[in-house]
Image (cartoon, rainbow, N blue to C red):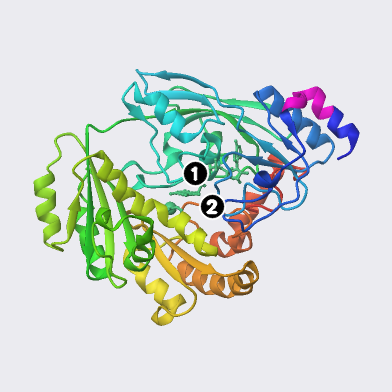
Amino acid sequence: MHSKIRLAFEKMVGCSNIITQDLNNYNRDWMNKYVGQSQLVLTPQTSEHVSQILKYCNQNQLKVVPQSGNTGLVGGSVPINDEIVISMRKMNKIYEFDQNSAIITSESGVILQNLNDYLFEYKYQMPWDLGARGSCLLGGNISTNAGGLNVVKHGLLRNYIMGLEVVLPNGKILNLMNKNRKDNTGTDLKQLFIGSEGTLGIITKANVLCIPIPQEKKVFFLELQSFQDVIKVLQKVKKNEQVLAFEFMEGRILKKNKNRHSQNTLPFQFDDNKYYVLIEIAGQQLNVDQFSIEMMEFTQEIIINQNEKEAQFLWKLREEIAESMGKMGYVLKYDVSIPPDKFEWLVNQVYPQREGPFHVYYGHVGDGNVHINIVFESLEHLHKEEDKIELKLFGLVKSLGGSISAEHGIGQHKRKYMELQKGKDVLECLYSIKKLFDPNSIMNPNKLL
Ligand code: FAD
Ligand code: MLT
Ligand code: ZN
């Protein structure tokens, strides 16, 4: 790196917030699929730091990548070339929780789990939850409009963001902070930054509406004979307001993962050809017996947790799928939205008779969001197959009126399919917005757009 540039950053943020060695963790994504070449990571500690960094980068045409927990699954948080990584980890102050409005005010670099730990004493929690909760940061969640495990009951993250502070590429600190539940004063500018994957500015603070921790919870783990049965159960419980999560897993992945657990802790002898559903209900005075009877219409094979440890274990069976697939090789991951009753059909279209490389589908059936993961033994092999699979898969998703990304976003991975998803007119609008905020294209280049 040019010594003049280094000196300029030293003046802005101090030597302790500049990293130039051992950058592997910043250059490589969670799946080991995308590797960048950054020579410089900056770790701002204040919004003013972020402002000075962006202003300087903008004036000198230096490209930047905002990075939070780096758990993103589409290569959005890692550089492609030698962009400067702006790691938000040190902006981790929680300011306050207002018990009257149930709004938390925080810097954007706080780990999701830490926000929940902070809220615990007030008997509140964050309104979204995902497997990466121990590593992902608030700003990363907001920038991806993260989905997750409770969308079926609570809806999407963007509905809970009451206010934001965003630093624009020209260094301006845009104050969109707001602690009012209701604010109907024209165009809601902050929405542009939610889900824009670091392409318009850097989110530095947020006000988030929190939800009360439910008084009771119960997890049901069901073994079903067919995917049709999964849909029948979904139809049955869809109207039930106490359903917090409705997750689906194929037998073939649970069986493969069984060695991760001692035999006597497993709820079933998992079967390759069976279908498994995890349903969590939450609320006050849960009618567990009634719910169990309703589930017995579909199967006798039901596990209901008796304590918190058992609930965690049942959830682990679902949440460990992402990590376990990564251990098998290089994974092509998809997170499409389609009508739930088409999940099995879609997979069978891509891999008739389920032949081909080892692949599974699982996910948030309750939200119409299926994950398809395909494992390859090398990155070369994965790249050779990628285009072929995507042309077919995304073509089918589009024909069903679905979305090529239900929750993980676009990043580097799906950028070339944006026109297929959005159409020319919408894409043109998005490019105009990008140009307005970031005329020099310094923000997260070659991601999303
Ligand atoms: P990063 O990965 O660091 O960044 C994500 C994107 O946001 C990048 O484009 C980055 O440039 C941008 N960005 C980051 N911080 C900022 C900021 N402060 N300002 C502007 N732009 C910024 N996702 C789901 O939606 N649902 C799930 O259920 C889910 N489960 C997961 C489970 C596992 C085990 C893993 C590894 C990932 C999972 N993900 C899931 C994906 C990922 O965790 C989410 O996308 C998460 O929101 C990313 O947060 P992060 O802090 O890691 O952000
Ligand atoms: C999940 O639902 O487990 C996450 O979105 C991660 C994944 O797709 O594997
Ligand atoms: Zn998911």
Q: Amino acid at mark 1?
A: Asn
Please name the residue shown 50% across and 64% down the image. Answer: 328
Q: Reply yes or no: does residue 257 show up in magenta.
A: no
Give how far apart the Cα atoms at labels 2 and 1 are: 8 Å
Which of pointers 2 and 1 lies earlier in the amino acid sequence? 1
Q: Amino acid at mark 2?
A: Gly
Q: Tell me if I can see residue 181 in this picture.
A: no
- In the image, is 307 to the left or to the right of 106? left
The N terminus lies in which quarter of the figure?
top right
Kindly report the secondary structure that dominates the magenta region of the rendered protein: helix
Residue 72 position within the rendered picture, expressed as x and y whole percent measured from the top left: 55, 49
Residue 392 position within the rendered picture, expressed as x and y whole percent measured from the top left: 52, 74
Residue 393 position within the rendered picture, expressed as x and y whole percent measured from the top left: 50, 71
- In the image, is 387 to the left or to the right of 178? right
**Pointer 1 residue Cβ closer than 8 Å to ligand 1:** yes
Q: Quadrant of residue 46?
A: top right
- Number of numbered discs overlaid on the protein picture: 2
**Disc 1 marks which residue?**
145
Residue 100 position within the rendered picture, expressed as x and y whole percent measured from the top left: 35, 18
**In the image, residue 150 above or below residue 214:** below
2 and 1 marks in contact (CB < 8 Å): yes
**Disc 2 marks which residue?**
409
**In the image, residue 245 above or below residue 105:** below
Indicate the secondary structure of the residue bearing disc 2: loop
The one of 449 and 336 positioned closer to us in this rendering: 336
Q: Which residues are magenta?
A: 8-16
